[in-house]
Every structure is written in C-alpha cells, then in structure tokens.
Amino acid sequence: MSRILAALLAFAITTPALAQEANPQAIAAERAAMARFAWMKGIWRGPAVTQTAQGPRKVTQTERIGGFLDGTIILMEGKGFRDDGSTGFHAFGVLSFDPNRGEYTLRSHAQGYGGSFKFTPTDTGYIWETPAGPNAVMRYTATLHDGIWTETGDRIVAGQPPQRSFEMNLKRIGDTEWPEAGANRP
C-alpha cells in the first residue's frame, strides 16, 4: 500500500472521531445564551389575529417550547386552531446561538415558507425580521409582561408607517418535557 493511500485511510478512520469531539467552551456559551430565553419554555395558549385581504383571521394560538441538546438550542412549535378545531396555522422553529459570531439565529418553518433569521434579544423579549418584498420587512416584536407573552408583527416599508398584521397574547398554562420526553435512550 502506498504511503499516500495509507495516510488517506488513516485520515478517513480518525476524522469521524475528531468530528465528534465536544467543544466545552462553545457548549457553555450556548447554554448561557439560551438561559436568557428560559421564560419561553412550557406550553402557552391565547388569542391571535392576523390581518388578511379578506379581513381578520382569528385563532387560538398555542406554543410548545422546550430545550434540546443539553440546553444549547430551543425548539418551538406554534399551532393556531380555528373555532371548529381545525389547524389554521402551524410553525416550527429552532433558536440557536453562535458563540463565534455572538449572534442568535431563528430557523423558522411555517405555511410552506422557511428561512434563517437574525434574532435580537431585548430587555423585555426579542425582535426578529423576515423579508417582505422590495424595501420591506416583517418585524416581529415580543415582550413578556405580567405573565403575558405578546408578539406583534408589523410590515415595514421604507418611507411608510408600519402596518400591524399580527398580534398574539399568550398565557403560560404549564410545563412540557417536549422535545426530550421519549428521546432515544441507551
């Protein structure tokens, strides 16, 4: 066997083991960053309304939020129910923190759309934005006040006043072991 082939074989055998090595400093930084949003964990419920071309669309919004990967990320499932019990909205998100960049990212999937978005902490909650056309964004602003999680969505077009298109007001109704409950075990 040639030395090059032997070196490549040795690299192929050891690389997966090296790739699995934990980075304790990064994990600690991720956990510390996620602790800021521990208030979100649990089950939430309350009214939500979206303004559409056909008029307001109301749902009972629910959120199921839990930590994952030893508290280094937060998983979110949002589900809105119409009066007849059918699903009017369904979303999934992953909140993470990159200690190398010092930034949070929200990876969101909803209603056939998805993307990664900058997620900015505030003193009372957070802000995140999605593109909404030329020179426009949808800005979602969340606050926690007196046990109520309020999140609003405003379409912001350069040179125009913001247009409110979404609002939810949720109360925490309990704990959840999701997503860790039922996870793989040895």
Image: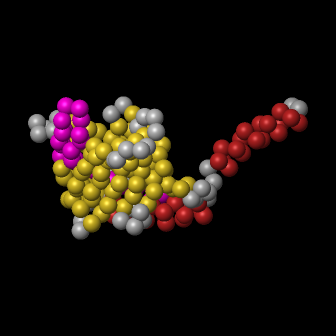
Q: Can the viewer see residue 114?
A: no
Q: Position of residue 88 (x, y in %)?
A: 22, 36
Q: Quadrant of residue 145?
A: bottom left
Q: Which residue does the image show at 71% across and 41% down from the upper left?
A: 13
Q: Main secondary structure of the magenta part?
A: strand
Residue at 36% in and 61% down: 125
Q: Nearer the viewer, residue 76 or 49?
A: 49
Q: What range is drawn magenta here?
A: 48-72
In the rendered image, residue 69 lying in the magenta stretch gets the answer yes
Q: Is residue 67 magenta?
A: yes
- Residue 91 is drawn in which quadrant? top left
Say which quarter of the image contains residue 58: top left
Q: Residue furthest right?
A: 2
Tell which of 178 and 62 is nearer to you: 62
Q: Residue furthest front?
A: 159
Q: Is residue 85 left or right of residue 179?
A: left
Residue lying at the far left in this picture: please name it: 84
Q: Residue at x 72, y 39 (%)?
A: 12
The x, y position of residue 139, in whole percent, is 38, 48
Q: Nearer the viewer, residue 59 or 162?
A: 162
